[in-house]
Image: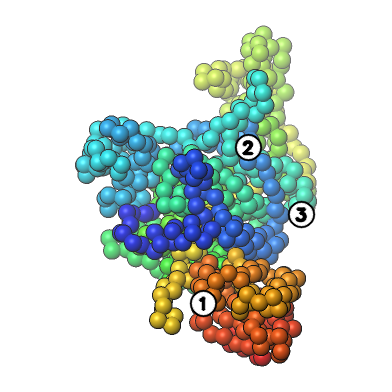
Amino acid sequence: MSEQEHAETPDTTSEKLVELAKRRGYFFQSAGAYGGVGGFYTFGPQGAALKGNIEDAWRDRFAVAEGNMEIDAPTIMPEPVFEASGHLEGFDDMLVECPECGESHRADHVVEDNTEYEDAESLPIPEVEEVIAEYELVCPNCGAGLAGQAVEAFNLMFKTNIGPGDSQPGYLRPETAQGIFVEFPRLKEYARNQLPFGVTQIGRAYRNEISPRRSIIRTREFTQAELEYFIDPEADEPDLSSVEDVTVTLYPASEQDAEGGTEIETTIGEAVAAGIITDQWVAYFLGVAKPWYEAVGVDMDRFRYRQHLPGERAHYASDCWDAESEIDGNWIEMAGFAHRGNYDLSKHGDHSGDRFTIFKQYDEPRTVERATVDPDMSYLGPEFGGDAETVVEKLEELAARNRSAFDGETVEIDLDGETREIPVETTGFSLEAKTEAGEHITPHVVEPSFGVDRVVYTVLHHAYREDEVDGEERTYLDLEPEVAPTFVGVFPLQNDDELETEAREVAAALREAGLSVTYDDSGNIGRRYRRQDEVGTPFCVTVDYESLEDEAVTVRERDTTAQKRLPIEDLPTALPAIRAGDLEFEDLEG
């Protein structure tokens, strides 16, 4: 994932949030007892629950509601998978090493943090070196000059070995997508060989980041939620009617390149009609994702879609947009929406020898002219030896791709970088009329790829609030009820056996109703309210002495601190209705 960010000013919301997250069990650096290790974080009880709720919300929207499948592939895969995908050759970041302290840094981050360049990642390495020298940029760690230091490509893959002895090399996956692509020959059968169909996956991915930073925004182990949607590019079009009226803030490449360029407020339908979003499938998923982000608690005044500039877009992607959120004045990427073409399936098909295609049946059988070869092995064998079978494959491929190559007396093929001529008469080249019921096509892929950890961080950051209640400063998280780690806190007013017994019975009834509940009888009631406010619990229920008489409790709402009296017997139906959005707190009646 790319990222646009700059140095923060002191005492930012992020700094306060990181402190709160550690204190209240949202997230903290892993292995602290051993000094910690950069780029690895543990989600505590609150953070794991919030993250799980966001994952469930994503699954409900992008798997269940869209009718897509979900799989769970291994996080380690053999080396050939990543040879085919191109990760071994091209999955690099730019590294620059300090000549004084030896610290390694992302060269593009050093540039972005200290110059007006916002997308240094898309610059070629020589140009990044020139920028470092021109601006006399220094090491963020010790202040030594970096001008003249070589900027090198650093592969982000974590390598491992599979099995003992002469083990098979493998890698921790840098994205969940390859686990879907490599299983396409079987997954298409589950889809009954019918396009379009989608496959989702939520799981861990690993990237050996040069300089992980900003807590869980840039880490070496993280969670992705990805959808790979397989389509017939000539036949499948999305139904935009359900998303055409979704309002979006767009930052297209044309505006990024223009002097004084700015974001555009529009709708999905208008953006497609105006050619701002050129790919309709990408437009569809942008329209689906925007209400989802709002539902889980992303502030829509601090949210936009930014189009990739040509230099940062993957070579196989026809278009790509990032969902970005504003954090302390900086924009961070939360998701990417790309049309990947048939690159991935074609690569795995070429490298594996398996068929990564789908048979597309014609409405009526067609008679077509096909070029075929039937090589004379008595010639090819002595001439090419062990390469004879490879020559046959190359002749077959050439006949299918360019039959005119066989028009002369000889035909040329490339064999290990050397051009070889073969007499056409020995190839058995011919044209045959065949009646076919259909053809094998390689589907194209549209991919919405979400960084779950970054969504978690954004939701927490956008929910962070400070106010004053009864003359006392208060910090609270304005989390949406759907994703809040705990939905309701239950308290006895005082440490009294009867009150505690009643309060525990109330907590048990609410758990049976499917709500996440915390029970707290430690400290005065005001302190217990503050604890729950700080972790974002939407409601608190207090059992007092009157409850023993009238079988009613006090229900307190987090944001306004308003309170209402409600019969205990109504709680298991009223509170779930509020969580589901079917009832408002203001409408509760005692």
- Name the mark on residue 190: none
Eyeballing the image, is 505 above or below 417? below
Distance from disc 3 to disc 1, alpha carbons, whole Å, reads: 72 Å
Q: Which residue is mark 2?
A: 76
Q: Are marks 3 and 2 in contact (CB under 8 Å)?
A: no
Assess disc 1: are there few (<14), some (14-19) or many (≥20) residues with their C-alpha within 10 Å of its C-alpha: few
Q: Position of residue 157 (x, y in %)?
A: 52, 36
Residue at point 66%, 68% (across, down): 516
Spot occupied by residue 574 in the image (x, y as percentages of width and height): 69, 82
Residue kind at label 2, given as amino acid type: Ile
Q: Looking at the picture, does residue 322 appear above or below residue 483? A: above
Judged from the image, the secondary structure of the residue bearing numbered disc 1 is helix
- Secondary element under disc 3, as helix, strand or loop, is strand
Q: CA distance from mark 2 to mark 1?
A: 49 Å
The image quarter containing residue 258 is bottom left
Looking at the image, tell me whether mark 3 or mark 1 is earlier in sequence order: 3
Query: Looking at the image, which residue is at 56% across and 67% down?
Result: 296
In the shown orientation, is residue 570 left or right of residue 271?
Answer: right
Question: Can the viewer see residue 453 in this picture?
Answer: yes
Residue at label 3? 363
| Residue 208 drawn at (x, y percent) | 48, 39
